[in-house]
Image (cartoon, helix red, strand yellow):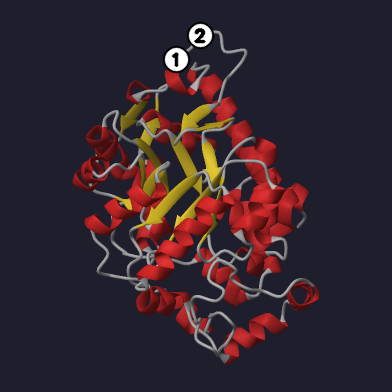
Amino acid sequence: MRLNDCHNLRDFRELARRRLPGPIFNYIDGGADDESTTRRNTAAFEACDLVPSVLRGVKEVDLSVTVMGQKLALPFYCSPTALQRLFHHRGEHAVAAAAAGCGTMFGVSSLGTVSLEELRRKHATPQVYQFYFHKDRGLNRAMLERAKAAGVNVMMLTVDSITGGNRERDKRTGFSIPFRLTLTGMVQFALKPMWGINYLAHERFRLPQLDGHVDMGGGSMSIGRYFTEMLDPSMNWDDVAEMVKLWNGPFCLKGVMSPADARRAADIGCNGVIVSNHGGRQLDGSRSAFDGLAEVVDAAGDRLDVMMDGGVMRGTHVLKALSLGAKAVGIGRAYLYPLAAAGQPGVERALHLLRDELERSMKLMGCTSVAQLSRANLRLRPA
């Protein structure tokens, strides 16, 4: 199977599965507990039908949007994700370059594997920083100031990860940073020697946003343990309000599922919220992001830019979210599988396919711009 054989996300997922050691593939692919929310995130889109209009004259389609003060050529962006250089040695550089080529923004995680400064220097496209709130308040302030100095465009505080989700796939393989694998995990690495050659032949793996600040355990630390031991479950609205003032720029909360929380975010000065359940990787049984989107949009009114992520696999999924009122849609696994499959060319192909799907769907819906999309385009199927 080659990159040119990939025509949708399932194809990219299969190519990634063939190229990655099992523990790393399962880290991308898995969710919390029984993974019911991970599955529901995509299934929710399928319970909503599109109602097209015809004879509208749709020779040209404008997909551009403005979200969080950033003008984007596309209404979807690359959400911040951790540990990208485990999936491909180019990691965030590959994703940032692909996003820049498509005129959209990309996110960098606190657990990113390339520094904010290096990415800002090399890739001229809007950059979002996914901030994890640590127990060490001095570290939080230092990270905030560093992001501002680096020229980050949007601060994105993750609020659904104050403790680690129960990611049982990682427990079975022993996936951790650095690696401390079970016997089964070690066998999986041995079966994919090219991954190991690339991993060892390139720049040493590290977490530059946390270097000098956080001890990842000396020997090893699972991501779940990092969330549970390093992050601050006492974080509250007063802490966030202080961060908003210190940042003094575009600021959004990632992981909002409640209309009341969206209103509270607006009250303390946030500019946006992202309706998200962390890809089903935290609270299993949580409502899907798409199912909760309309309520949050209605609660936010014109006070917030509402975005969403979770389960997006097709251009029609993006279209449905935009029709419900999302200003833009984040993708995660939809670019991580392509990254693992083929690096930057993989991410580029995935973004181009998603763009083409969305443009084609807009034409078939009879809409020439994102502004023309509305809930009148949709019908929910009876439960």
Q: Which residue is mark 1?
A: 53
**Considering only vertical position in the picture, is 240 above or below 222?**
above
Is residue 315 visible in the rendered image? The answer is: yes
**Considering only vertical position in the picture, is 124 above or below 184?**
above
Does the residue at mark 1 contact the one at mark 2 (Cβ under 8 Å)? Answer: yes
Quadrant, the C terminus: top left
Q: Secondary structure at mark 2?
A: loop
Q: What is the distance, in whole Å, between disc 1 and disc 2 at their CAs?
A: 7 Å
Q: Position of residue 89 (x, y in %)?
A: 72, 66
Residue appearing at x 65%, y 81% in the figure? 188
Q: In the rendered picture of this protein, how many numbered marks are placed on residues?
A: 2
Residue appearing at x 62%, y 66% in the figure? 113
**Left or right side of 60 for 4:** right
Q: Which label sits on residue 253? A: none
Quadrant, the N terminus: bottom right
At label 2, the amino acid type is Arg
Residue appearing at x 78%, y 74% in the figure? 194
Residue appearing at x 52%, y 66% in the figure? 111
Q: Position of residue 296 (x, y in %)?
A: 27, 40
- Identify which residue, 77 or 108, lies in the foreground: 108
Q: Which residue is mark 2?
A: 56
